[in-house]
Image (tube, helix red, strand yellow):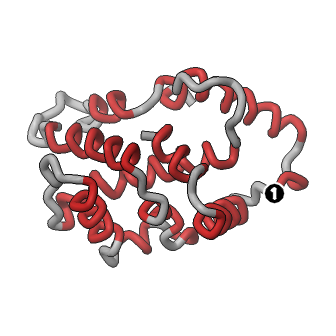
Amino acid sequence: MVTALYRALAGAPSRVKEPVLSQWLAARGREEERRSARARAREEGALKELLRDLHWPGQGWEPELLLVALHTYFAIMGKLLAAPLLGFSYPRQAGNGELEEWLTGLEGHPFFPLADGEEGGSFSWYLKAWTPPLARAFLQLVGRLRAYDHTRRPGEGADLLRPLYYSLLPPAVESV
């Protein structure tokens, strides 16, 4: 999913990509001149590890776009987990258009601009950069969520979402 988000953003027209990247960088105070060399080196090491776990080649990628894709993934997961609580049923084997329409409805819910905080909808950029590979990744993700047994009772102190969390997260991100 992170790979599909990255590729959709990297391939998006500048009118879509540039505002998303600028807003994301500004919201996190990530302008290059404000970061220390040590912080940049630590971040570069973590990004290389993530790229290895995502089975990406070591060249031709943009770290900022990867981080936007990763943050977008986490925002999407929160929204998809909240969807049933807000009255949205996960779509079943929807086509590309139906899935995009369902996600547009979900992103249009009044709760999510509040949940995005200062970013105010910056994590819904993927709808403007929609691609067939992104649709396939969403269908896989929604299928996993639809199949998850939310009624299972965890043991004392156990985390109900732990198995789902570990099945959806790349190993490099789990340990951070």
Residue lying at 48% horizontally and 59% vertically, measured from the top left = 129
The kind of residue tagged 1 is Glu
Residue lying at 33% horizontally and 49% vertically, measured from the top left = 135
Residue lying at 30% horizontally and 74% vertically, measured from the top left = 109
Spot occupied by residue 153 in the image (x, y as percentages of width and height):
12, 35
Spot occupied by residue 176 in the image (x, y as percentages of width and height):
57, 31
Q: Is residue 41 left or right of residue 13?
A: right
Spot occupied by residue 6 in the image (x, y as percentages of width and height):
54, 45
- As drawn, which residue projects farthest toward the left? 151
The quarter holding residue 144 reads: top left
Q: How many marks?
A: 1
**Label 1, on which residue?**
31
- Around disc 1, counting alpha carbons within 10 Å, would you say few (fewer than 14), some (14 to 19), or many (20 or more)? few
Of residue 173 and residue 124, the one placed in the foreground of this image is 124
Residue lying at 50% horizontally and 38% vertically, measured from the top left = 3
Q: Secondary structure at mark 1?
A: loop
Viewer can see residue 27: no
Of residue 50 and residue 103, the one placed in the foreground of this image is 103
Q: Is residue 57 left or right of residue 45?
A: left
Q: Is residue 41 left or right of residue 72?
A: right
Q: Is residue 109 left or right of residue 46?
A: left
The quarter holding residue 119 reads: bottom right
Viewer can see residue 63: yes
Q: Is residue 33 above or below residue 49?
A: below
Q: Quadrant of the N terminus?
A: top left
Spot occupied by residue 60 in the image (x, y as percentages of width and height):
70, 34
Of residue 73 and residue 158, the one placed in the foreground of this image is 73
Q: Is residue 77 above or below residue 14?
A: above
The quarter holding residue 87 reads: bottom left
Q: Is residue 64 above or below residue 27?
A: above
